[in-house]
Image: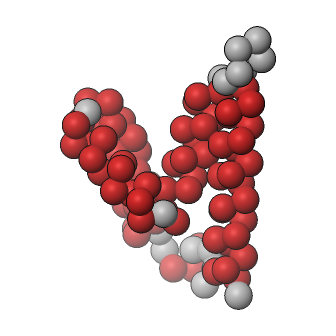
Amino acid sequence: MLRFMKRLARWAAALALIVLGLVLSIPGVPGPGLLIVLIGVFVLLPESRWLRKKFVALKRRYPKLFHPIETRRARSRHARRTRPRSTRRGQ
């Protein structure tokens, strides 16, 4: 049940960010609209197979653009794996 609630919260947060970003992208409304849309898409990335496929295709086409993102994700994965079991959340 907890896993379902996490997925539901992730979908809700991502869709809210995407809608907010689209509103902020309207001409005349100040704000970083496209950046917020991208953040919403990245929040949704682990939940959507279609988005993962598109991300991989873009990553192959523009490796220099996605290198900083991949470096940060790799560091985060490594930190999660090397963290002692007693400090992990949910266990």
State how the image is colored: secondary structure
In the picture provided, is 87 more to the left or to the right than 77? right
Q: How many marks?
A: 0
Closer to the camera in the image, 43 or 69 = 43
Q: Quadrant of the C terminus?
A: bottom right
Task: Please provide percent x and percent y for residue 8.
Answer: 70, 70
Answer with the quarter of the image where residue 61 lies: top left
In the picture provided, is 54 more to the left or to the right than 30? left
Task: Please provide percent x and percent y for residue 89.
Answer: 62, 74
Specify whether residue 75 is in view. Answer: no
Question: For the point 72% across and 65% down, which residue is it?
Answer: 9
Question: For the point 58% across and 30% down, which residue is it?
Answer: 35
Closer to the camera in the image, 51 or 1 = 51
Above or below 71: residue 30 = above
Q: Residue furthest bottom?
A: 1
Answer with the quarter of the image where residue 4 lies: bottom right
Above or below 53: residue 61 = above
Q: Quadrant of the N terminus?
A: bottom right
Q: Residue furthest top?
A: 28
Question: For the point 26% across and 33% down, which residue is it?
Answer: 62
Task: Please provide percent x and percent y for residue 77.
Answer: 40, 60
Answer with the quarter of the image where residue 88 lies: bottom right
Task: Please provide percent x and percent y for residue 25.
Answer: 67, 24
Q: Residue furthest right?
A: 29
Specify whether residue 91 is in view. Answer: yes
Question: For the point 58% across and 28% down, which residue is it?
Answer: 34
Above or below 83: residue 45 = above
